[in-house]
Amino acid sequence: MSSLRRRRLPITNLICVGTLALVGTTVMPHGVSWAADLQASSAPAAGPVDGLFGSYAVGDPLDDKYLTGGWNGWRSKLVSEGITFRGDYVSETMGVVSGGLDQGFRYSQQVRLGADFDMAKLANWTDGRFHVTLNDRMGRGTSSELAGNRFPIQENYGGQWTRITEASFDQNILDGKVNYKLGYFPMGNDFGMTQLLTNFVNAAFCAHPLAQSANTGWYNYPNARWSAEVTYKVTPEVYVRTGLFQVNPSLGLEKNAFNPFAEGTMGTLLPVEVAYEPGKGTAYPGHYKVGYVYDNSNVKELGLSDYIGQRQGTYIMIDQKITTVAGDDSRGLSVFAQYMWSNPETAVLRDWWSAGLVYQGVFDSRPKDVLAFGYVQASVNEQLLENARIKAAATTGAFSDFTLAEKALELSYTYQINKWASIRPDVQYIMDPGSFYFKHIDDVVAVGMQLKVVF
């Protein structure tokens, strides 16, 4: 571990010796969590047995869903009483074997710990929940140290310290048609998300277009900001979501990891997203999203000294399952595509698009394994490119032919070891990796593996 960043909180060490016992539950959009599913699936397999905190079931089905098991039934009991703990570990060991700045391997990891409190069960608050999450990252970057490219080859590299990443409350009202959420959390938890793309390792795929956070005050996990959002379900398949989000770059600094009230607010971001989600609960689910982002921050126009009082962009995101396997609706082929355009006066990434395929259950003997293949491309703002060419010509006396876009191909295979652990061998090919730094860098071949464990 000598190559890793010095720790400030020994969270990882505690996990390694098995002293933490946390549920690996993920909070879903619209305030829905897996807690209800856990409670429903925790019916006793045999007669109840008395324990320290009440009775528990012998053979609790939660025993094999998490690394730390079902805690002799206490986990199900806590869920039934309104308390759900979350915890997971993700490591990404990726290396450059050809091209780039240098060859070698780098390791990074993320540990996430949190809890959800169902206030309907705890305090008779109708359909409301509190959420608290801490995030810890450590390690070194393959892209920053070896490849020299813009697309992060490791999705969990960035902000290598411990921080508060959520303290929020959400509630469903009006018979579940409206959900509101208030507090301190990343807007990318709910906006601009394509869940299907979590089957990749490169952050250019997983699970938002990087143009969203590169070109405006948009913040994805684990970067939290003071926020308020509301979702209205027009029909069971259609929703409209909007909100107000603080733009404060200083909250992304290590010194403010536990200071959500740090100074530095420069504006407010207003997103609007409309989604159509056909096929819910069927063999062919789909997600079709269109969004608009407006940021009123007063920022400089690219390449100029003049300030412009807004940043904006639009995006479209599509994924659709198109085949299935008889007897198992979870298996089959899904396709996806994304496009984002941003205001060229302020956007570093002029436009962005990606497309690919995800197949679950390629082999009958491995129905939970996932094969994923994708292509992504982002173009450099032409004003920045022209400025770089002029500067290079003034320095060297020659007009440099810098490339216009960085492109990447990725192929991954997720091997589901059991219900709480998976490994993901991964291969990435990065074309024109120096595009956003106006450097000529040889195309990169990166290989490695991701490991996921749910506690």
Image (spheres, helix red, strand yellow):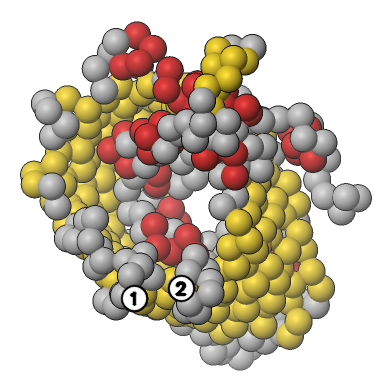
Mark 1 is surrounded, within 10 Å at the Cα level, by few (under 14), some (14 to 19) or many (20 or more) other residues, namely: some
Mark 2 is surrounded, within 10 Å at the Cα level, by few (under 14), some (14 to 19) or many (20 or more) other residues, namely: some
Q: Quadrant of residue 32?
A: top left
Q: Residue at x 59, y 82 (%)?
A: 429
Q: Secondary structure at mark 2?
A: loop
Please name whichever residue, 216 or 289, is drawn nearer the observer in this view of the structure. 289
Q: Residue at x 34, y 9 (%)?
A: 123
Q: Quadrant of residue 122?
A: top left
Q: Is residue 164 visible?
A: no
Q: Secondary structure at mark 1?
A: loop
Could you tell me if the residues under marks 2 and 1 are in contact, i.e. CB atoms within 8 Å?
yes
The residue labelled by disc 1 is 325
Q: Quadrant of residue 182?
A: top left
The residue labelled by disc 2 is 361
- Image: 228 above or below 303: above
Which x, y percent locates residue 229?
Answer: 27, 34
Please name whichever residue, 213 or 296, is drawn nearer the observer in this view of the structure. 213
Total marks placed: 2
* Identity of the residue furthest to the left in this view: 234
Q: Is residue 70 left or right of residue 227?
A: right
Q: Residue at x 48, y 77 (%)?
A: 364
* Identity of the residue furthest to the right in this view: 2
- Image: 342 above or below 378: above
Please name whichever residue, 51 or 428, is drawn nearer the observer in this view of the structure. 51
